[in-house]
Amino acid sequence: MKHQPDGKTVAILTDVTKCIGCRDCVVACKQTYNLDKDVPRRWSNDDGLSSRNWTSIIERENNTFVRKQCRHCLEPACVAACPVGALQISDEGPVIYDSKKCMGCRYCMLVCPYGIPRYDWDLAVPFVRKCIMCFPRLQEGKQPACTEACPVEATIFGTRDELLAEAHRRIKAEPDKYINKVWGEDEIGGSRVLYISNVDLSFLTYGKNYDNKSVPSLARPAMNAVLPTFATMAGTMAGVGWIINRRMKNMQTDELEENQDNSSSAVSSDEGDSNNG
Amino acid sequence: MDRVHRLKSVLWTIIGIAAAVGMTRYIFGLGATTNLTDRVPWGLWIGFDVMGGVALAAGGFVVTAIYYIFRREELHPIVKPAVLTAFLGYLAVAFGLLFDLGLPWNIWHMIIFWNPHSPLFEVGWCVMLYLAVLLLEFSPVPLESFSAWAKIRSFLIKWKLVLVILGISLSTLHQSSLGSLFLLTPYKLHPFWYTPILPILFFISAVYLGLMMASWESLFTTHVYRREKETSLIAHLVGAARWVILLYVIVRFGDLFVRGQLGSLAEINYYTVMFGLEITIVAIVPFILTMIPKVRDSNPGQWFIASFGVFGVVFNRTVTGGLAHLVQDGASRYIPAWTEFIVSAGVVSFMAILFLFFVEHFKVWEQRAADPSVDPEKLPEFDKASNASIGTPLLAGWTKNSLIFISAAAVGLMFMSGKKVASQGIDSTPVSQARGCEVLMVDGNLDGYGVKFPHAEHITRIGSEPEKCTVCHHMNLPGDSQTECSNCHSEMYQSVDAFRHDWHASSDGANISCFKCHDKGKPKDVDSAVECSECHQDLIPAGATIKVDQYNAPGYVDALHIACIRCHETYIDTVANRKIDECSSCHKGAITPENKKFAEIVMTKVKAGKFQITPEIKKDRE
């Protein structure tokens, strides 16, 4: 894959202090993808996202509105998790979904640190649904529908470098207004959807202490050990099997010759090994 | 054989009900048959069927390793059944996945679409390969009955050791990789369970479970078929298992210590209870019991030890797979639906039926388990009431089990909840007792729009006595769960009679003369009228700016929807004691030119059908 370098990749910056909560972005998203009417379901989360709502506005204290959408991580957990590669990072940057490959295991939903992917629980042919950062529109040279629709430029589109610079510029210009942090810059490996805010946004994740390690990097040691483990186990088993086989053959000939029971040595080697598996 | 027949009846009943649920699942989707949510995408079908199924099949690689590699000949009687169980266990995994996967017809996609970075990809491939290996490992047993296949059979037996080594290596990989699956969920899995060495812990417990499962299976089949008990062999197996579990406990607690989690075990909460329960079942009870020679060597004692061991590890898998996942504030915990339990039970029962089929028809044990139904000496049976022939015992058995299966499926369909199957909106909740949730998401006006509904707050306001619940939960139309919000909060939706001219003029109403309000000698219109507050001093505070130029004023919701953000930003929250049915509680003070200009811009936009904040408005706002 010929991904854009991280700095040049597309990104969205949402300035929480600017959002007026008009939900034009939600409407634009639904119109672009012809998403069905949404009714509250037993399985929906109270953040407004669903298989028919790919972005939503969350109301917080003091008339603060936070737009929730897929974060399009630089190292996405969902892409690493998907066993059939239905979730991919596109060349342009957005994390996109290929419904033709998907087999519906929902591992992506389990591993997403932001809890973004949603499922068509009510359909007999269900798919995983999430924001794709208007990948088809980007290919046409347009910007995502949500950023285009925003009446107050609270959410803007650009390259990641530009937007990071803009975010830091805004924080520097009005340090009293913002919390001095760009959400999505570093944590969990960094993301393409960035936030600056006057309220704490840790509720967008599971409210836990996040470090900057990306999720896929946590499983990497175990995954790298797979082939060595296989070779070691096969080799050990073949070796041990061969040794014990040979010893037992010798013993049998000994037994024939001396006709005496000599099996205690085999027993002791056995117990040690069965513990190791 | 009575025990076998009774067992088969029970198994077919379960399979029948599960078939009904399975059908519903394929027609109406996962939402209709599971309690899974967007927060909890994996439930019992993964936690038990897949994680548990793979773990239960661990007997295959552990027993073959001990028998073929370490050459412990005394295990001979249980090798074939262990391989058979392993094969069926993996078949159960594949079978269970057909229910759990959203798009089960794409289950083969992993063969052509590769993502080697995914732990699930690795598990999937190992399971596929190991299933093939197990098939080859076991097939000499059924092939024995077909002389035409003798060459292939002898070829397979010749290469058995290679298959065994391949099987052990593949098992090592995916038993541990099941743990690796959860390395990707650092923020969901509770720290008692989340550790970088999850794969190692899973592997050790799989070896333990392999020994326990082989014992349990021997105990079970010797009981059902009244075969000779293999007590001393089982004593050996559980004896070995206790050292494995000791190793597991040492590693587990060592890991907790290294990660500094040992201290948090002292608190009592959901997770510590789960942890304690798990360790007690999987390790402490079986370990103590195996340390007592009297218990270890007795048949009932072995039943206890093996059952605890098997259940303990399956419990561990289920807990890691879902029960120990952290729950966000306000979210309810996932509890599997009965439909999920019955499908899991159905998959296991189906595999049990297959197991019985194999041991009855092929030489899985030294002696084929003799089913009296296939005994040619037996005479046909007759129905006791009608005296009609119901065929030979074999045919009678088939008839009976078919009847059980179909009746059970019918009963299963009967119990499917129509509401849940239809998946329409929020499911009804029992009203026997208010659940006391802080905030519910309800479709309050049945118009397809969800709103946040502070349920607890309403309870405090209305009262929590059962009869108070009926204020909302009684006079409903069929299919409703609650009375519409607008039933009580009517003032928010109704347009307001700003000024009832008819009533003021009517002799049945206020009965006041025209000239009380309108100046004599002028046209009787708005301009010639006096301010409302001239009379209504109590209703309209001094300085209110209500000018009656139309009889009908928009309701609260409509008024806010016209100019929402402007009011929100500048005004509405600053008004103390605002009453939503009293316009003047907000509309007081002088109309400033800015206000008026803003209102005009907004109103033109509203009339044009599209309300957008233009640069003009933006400028005005700044």
Image (cartoon, coloured by chain):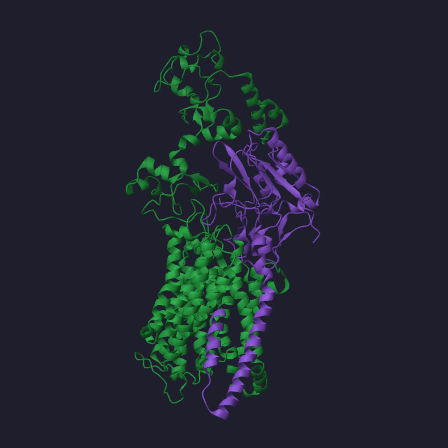
Chain colours: A purple, B green
Task: Decide: is B502 above or below B215.
Answer: above
Q: How many marks?
A: 0
Task: Decide: is B484 above or below B36.
Answer: above
Q: Please indicate, yes or no, whether residue B46 appears anywhere in the rendered image.
A: yes
Q: Nearer the viewer, residue A195 or B490?
A: A195
Task: Decide: is B60 above or below B120.
Answer: below
Q: Quadrant of residue B400?
A: bottom left
Q: Nearer the viewer, residue B180 or B468?
A: B180
Q: Position of residue B50 (x, y in %)?
A: 49, 64
In this image, B166 relative to B310: left or right?
right
Task: Identify the residue at the far front of this view.
Answer: A258
Q: Nearer the viewer, residue A225 or B317?
A: A225
Q: Position of residue B605 (x, y in %)?
A: 59, 28
In this image, B502 relative to A64: left or right?
left
Which of the image's four quarters has the N terminus of chain B? bottom left
Q: Please indicate, yes or no, whether residue A159 appears anywhere in the rendered image.
A: no
Q: Residue at x 45, y 76 (%)?
A: B355
Q: Position of residue B545 (x, y in %)?
A: 47, 17
Task: Identify the residue at the far top of this view.
Answer: B521
Q: Position of residue A205 (x, y in %)?
A: 52, 45
In this image, A242 relative to B482: left or right?
right
Q: Quadrant of residue B48?
A: bottom left
Which of the image's four quarters has the C terminus of chain B? top right
